[in-house]
Image: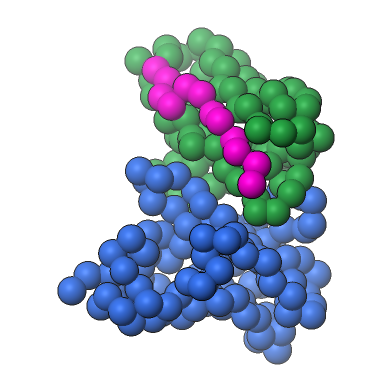
Chain colours: A blue, B green
Amino acid sequence: EVQLQQSGPELRRPGSSVKLSCKASGYSITDYLMHWVKHRPEHGLKWIGCIDPEDGETKYAQKFQSKATLTADTSSNTAYMQLSSLTPEDTATYFCARGLPGYVMDAWGQGASVTVSS
Amino acid sequence: DIRMTQSPASLSASLGETVNIECLASEDIYSDLAWYQQKPGKSPQHLIYDSNYLQNGVPSRFSGSGSGTQYSLKINSLQSEDVATYFCQQYNNYPLTFGSGTKLEIK
């Protein structure tokens, strides 16, 4: 069974950074892209970017180009997203989701809550 | 970026009714469109891919249609478990983009 297990909730101060993890089981992360999606109820779903763990190639939405850094560790079958220079607008739930190029995101993590507050 | 305009923003319908949700892309996305269902506190789950293909295990009362720039999700015989927010998403081009969502409630 394919599962994506995300790290737990985070509370951070403005200006700090956070690194979220997404551990895959039931498949090899090198066989799929890993997407990251931001969710705020009043703003809907926003695609942040994706990484191809096979070669480390990344794509980002322009809005998140300087905010997010995507990496992957094939030895642990885990993908990561670091968010930097946090502001209250980064308060959201972040999902990882696997997909193939030109295809849906067919499996999602449970989401990781990030709260940015002083 | 491809803009996905989804309507309506919210929808209230009775059990057993049929509802339709629309999504308009700002350019041709060649049926590279998915529909997701998200229940409160849960992650999105895809229902439909490639505009009209039903994901395994999804009830047949859900169906998708459309091509070019216009797409729709139809839910027949509305059930209480269908209460959720529904999103369309295009995967024809980067950046991937979502519709703004339709919140479906039962009257």
- Where's residue A118, x and y in %? 18, 74
Q: Is residue A4 left or right of residue A58?
A: left
Residue ID at (69%, 23%) = B70
Q: Is residue A14 left or right of residue A55?
A: left
- Where's residue B69, x and y in %? 72, 27
Does A70 appear above or below A61? below
Q: Is residue B96 left or right of residue A90?
A: right
Residue ID at (65%, 54%) = B95
- Where's residue A56, x and y in %? 73, 79
**Residue B83 sits inside the magenta stretch:** no
**Residue B3 sits inside the magenta stretch:** yes
- Frontmost residue, B101 versus A6: B101
| Residue B51 visible here | no
Q: Residue furthest bottom?
A: A75
Quadrant (top left, top right, bottom left, bottom right) of the C terminus of chain B = top left
Residue ID at (22%, 70%) = A117
- Frontmost residue, A108 versus A44: A44
Magenta part of the protein: which range?
B1-12
- Frontmost residue, B54 versus A51: A51
- Where's residue B90, x and y in %? 68, 42
Q: Quadrant of residue B51?
A: top right
Residue ID at (68%, 66%) = A59
| Residue B97 visible here | yes
Q: Is residue A23 left or right of residue A9?
A: right
Q: Quadrant of residue A99?
A: bottom right
Does A84 appear above or below B10? below
Numbered-mark total: 0
